[in-house]
Image (cartoon, rainbow, N blue to C red):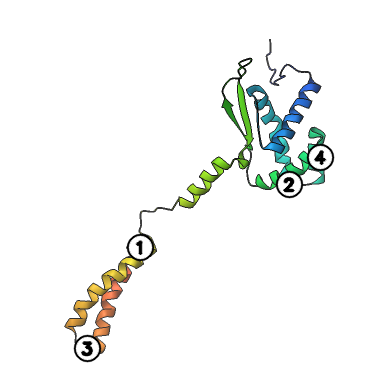
Amino acid sequence: MRHGDKIKNLGRTASHRAALLSNLTCQLIEHKRITTTLAKAKSLRVYAEPLITRAKSDSMHNRRIVFSYLQDKEAIKELFGVIGDKVANRPGGYTRIIKLPRRMGDAADMAMIELVDFNEIYSKDTKDSAAKKTRRSRRSTPKKAEAATPAASPVAEAPVAEETAPGAPATEATENTETPAAEANEDPNA
């Protein structure tokens, strides 16, 4: 029975499993996306994400710890350089597993595991939606209120200007008609 046995052994000894996960992590760092079996992808996520978390703070201590797992200088440079900068603001969840059709030879469950921040397809959608997204409120925006005020004020001013004699009283009358309209547009809650 396997009660309480939470580690996925993948049918390998401990040393073989460590080497496998180390190599898969180096390939994931290098290519940003790899295809493997579903069981390996799930084990890889558990193995790689703490290492990516360490890459968020670039220190000699973190580099040595990650190097003890990966044993690949080029992968360390890529991880602490490009990947560390991209995931600096992400609080976790650096990888995504996408299930693929079964493998033809042995019908194994296949999956693609990728780094979330390096997928161009999804990142373009999020940038476009963020750019197109506008803030909506129940109140009219100040730009709309200002645009409505000049359109309404010439109509209100014309009858007042015709009724009053040219001179000082006409300007006072137009100022009086503009003031209530401006106050009404400035404070919609009043």
- Which sits earlier in the primary sequence, circle 4 or circle 1? 4
Q: Is residue 120 above or below residue 2?
A: below
Image depth: mark 1 or mark 2 in front: 2
Q: Secondary structure at mark 3?
A: loop
Percent across and percent down for residue 53 are 70, 40
Badge 2 amino acid: Gly
Marks 2/4 in contact by CB < 8 Å: the verdict is no
- Which sits earlier in the primary sequence, circle 1 or circle 3? 1
- Which sits earlier in the primary sequence, circle 4 or circle 3? 4
Marks 4/3 in contact by CB < 8 Å: the verdict is no
| Label 2 to label 4: alpha-carbon separation | 12 Å
How many numbered discs sit on the rendered protein?
A: 4
Task: List the residue tagged with mark 2.
Answer: 81
Label of residue 144 in the image: 1
Q: Which residue is outermost to the left?
A: 163
Label of residue 166 in the image: 3
- Which sits earlier in the primary sequence, circle 2 or circle 4? 4
Badge 3 amino acid: Pro
